[in-house]
């Protein structure tokens, strides 16, 4: 697991999403093979793999967009531009 700890946050999210999809895909494929519907199982796995990518991109954007805003604002402040603002989102 040390390889996972060294990954940046975006890559951790991607790896986690694909690992969860794989953990779901293996038993699903085995179940379809046991029932005798191997082609259907492969199609389900292909659809799952196809849907994992957009979901991963959405999750990455939702979780890391505020970090990008903070990084950009802090870089501007470091260069002397104290007019930079960060929009507050969320409720207390």
Image (cartoon, grey):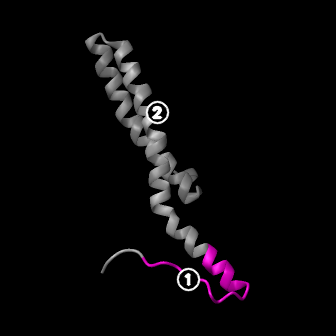
- Inspect the magenta stretch and tell me whether residue 77 lies in it: yes
Q: Quadrant of residue 76?
A: bottom right
The residue at 59%/57% (across/down) is 6
The residue indicated by pointer 2 is 50
Give the structural element (helix, strand or loop) at label 1: loop
Lateral position of residue 26 relative to residue 69, left or right = left
92 up-or-down from 16: above or below? below
- Inspect the magenta stretch and tell me whether residue 89 lies in it: no
* Local crowd size for mark 1, using a 10 Å CA cut-off: few (<14), some (14–19), many (≥20): few
Q: Which mark is residue 17?
A: none
The residue indicated by pointer 1 is 85
Give the residue furthest to the left.
Answer: 35
Residue 20 percent coordinates (x, y): 39, 42
Disc 2/disc 1 C-alpha distance (Å): 38 Å
Q: Nearer the viewer, residue 88 or 29?
A: 88
Q: Nearer the viewer, mark 2 or mark 1?
A: 1
Quadrant position of the C terminus in the picture: bottom left
């Amino acid at each position: 697991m040390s390889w996972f700890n060294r990954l940046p946050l975006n890559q951790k999210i991607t790896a986690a999403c694909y690992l969860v999809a794989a953990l779901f895909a293996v038993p699903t494929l085995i179940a379809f093979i046991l029932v005798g519907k191997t082609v259907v199982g492969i199609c389900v796995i292909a659809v799952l793999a196809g849907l994992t990518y957009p979901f991963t991109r959405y999750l990455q954007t939702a979780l890391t967009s505020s970090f990008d805003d903070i990084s950009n604002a802090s870089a501007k402040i470091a260069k002397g531009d104290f007019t930079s603002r960060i929009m507050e989102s969320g409720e207390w």
